[in-house]
Amino acid sequence: MCCFFSPVDKESVVWALSRLEPQPRVVDKSQLAAQFPELRREALELGHMFEEPFRTLVEATDPKTAFVLPARDKKPFAHGESLAGVVFIGDANHAVSPFAGNGANIALKDGWDLADAICREASLEAAVSAYDKISVSRADRTLKVSHQRIVMGHCTGAKYALLRGGPVRLEQNGRAVYIVRLPEASVRNTPTGNSLRRQCSGETSRGFGESCRQSGPHYVVCR
């Protein structure tokens, strides 16, 4: 579950609540006003773990402003000979979900870069090719960041804690096990390792340096 809100002015905010679903929800936009009480109830139920001002915001929402959006995205594409004379920019080429937080920005950049390429290049074909080299890679990066934000915003439990720095304390065969995210590949005899040893010292009688091992490029497990 992920919750977002942002001030609009001194008296209003925009808020959103999202969750992962196996299939996109079918939305009848013409019935949203009539469905608002149920949508509000669902939002309060799904977000029951959030502290104030979440409940106050939901209950004060203007029904006319409410909507449901199945968030999707679309990978960018380069223009080939079959699209000669037509150029797709912005969402027409690479739609991004609200989690990207960058859709309008890259659409404006597309327009600028296409105009710049048309002014610089000798032909429309050359201009579109130059535009594609900039636009497609930029949109790919935006989609990658968007997907990372979706994972981070909706993760729970140990994964939630690890993405935010840990450490995570688990039980394994009656012993305390810590999973810690680190910037270094190894923690033996390093300042980071010494710091983690102090964190673990209250829970285990064994020395950290004798009981830690690398677990992937950024994680260690200490017992």
Image (cartoon, grey):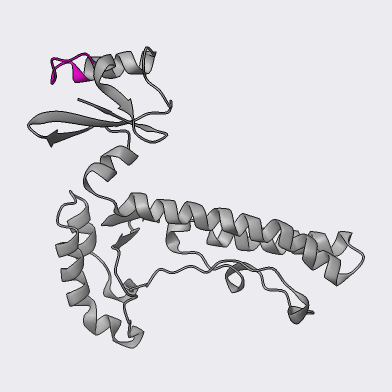
Residue at the image position 13 percent from the left and 28 percent from the top: 176
**Where residue 75 sits: x, y (%)?**
56, 66
**Where residue 104 sits: x, y (%)?**
56, 62
Viewer-closest of 117 and 34: 117
Quarter of the figure that contains the C terminus: top left
Q: Which residues are magenta?
A: 200-207
> Would residue 7 be seen by someone viewing this image from the given angle?
no
Q: Quadrant of residue 113?
A: bottom right
Residue at the image position 22 percent from the left and 62 percent from the top: 58
Residue at the image position 23 percent from the left and 77 percent from the top: 36
Q: Count the marks: how many? A: 0
**Where residue 170 sits: x, y (%)?**
16, 35
Quarter of the figure that contains the N terminus: bottom left
Viewer-closest of 129 and 48: 129
Compared with 191, 171 (above or below) is below
Q: Quadrant of residue 62?
A: bottom left
**Where residue 137 sits: x, y (%)?**
64, 56
From the viewer's perspective, tell me whether residue 193 is left or right of residue 77. left
Q: Quadrant of residue 98?
A: bottom left
